[in-house]
Amino acid sequence: PVTSVALSRAYHAKDIKPRNVGSMDKNDINVGTGLVGAPACGDVMKLQIRVDDDGIISDVKFKTFGCGSAIASSSYLTELVRGMSLDEAGKVKNTAIAKELSLPPVKLHCSMLAEDAIKSAIKDYKAKRAQHTILTSAAT
Ligand code: FES
Ligand code: FES
């Protein structure tokens, strides 16, 4: 239908060139990695954050094996959360992403993938830091 074509143009036009595609060393103690999949379609998103010692996200990279909306959502998310604290980034809602990109209802789960990915990356980062603390205190 005409409306969905118009909508898909709207969000594709906003994000023709995905930003921050790539990856970081997942073993780096300052890097958190989120890997999530969408059961509805099988698409997969990997999102990585670099967190400075002051708790601020200083860099973000993603690789998305999925549809245009998922790529646009992850690209937009990388720009959005850079400079945020972990708490702020953990509160980003997929609805904000979907609104910014004018995603149609059938593509809402694509933005959900981005929300899941940032949450998963934060969780990984925190788990890794906790583990690191245990290991370093055990070593002394
Ligand atoms: Fe996943 Fe669109 S259904 S690529
Ligand atoms: Fe499944 Fe977009 S992530 S269609």
Image (cartoon, rainbow, N blue to C red):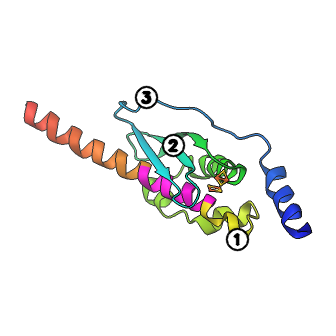
SS at mark 3? Answer: loop
Q: Residues within 10 Å of mark 1 (few under 14, many from 20)?
A: few
Going by the numbered disc 1, the residue's amino acid type is: Pro
User: In what quadrant of the picture does the N terminus appear?
Assistant: bottom right
**Residue under numbered circle 2:** 46
On the image, the x and y values in percent for residue 133 come to 20, 41
Tell me the residue that label 1 is attached to.
105
The amino acid type of the residue labelled 2 equals: Lys
**Quadrant for ligand 2?**
bottom right
Q: Which residues are magenta?
A: 110-120
Task: Give the image location of residue 137, x and y in percent.
Answer: 12, 37
Q: For the point 71% across and 67% down, which residue is it?
A: 99
Q: Is residue 105 left or right of residue 53?
A: right
Ranked by sequence position, the earlier of labels 2 and 3 is 3
Q: Are marks 2 and 3 in contact (CB under 8 Å)?
A: no
Question: Dot 2: within a 10 Å radius of its alpha carbon, few (fewer than 14), some, or many (20 or more) residues?
Answer: many
Residue 25 is tagged as: 3
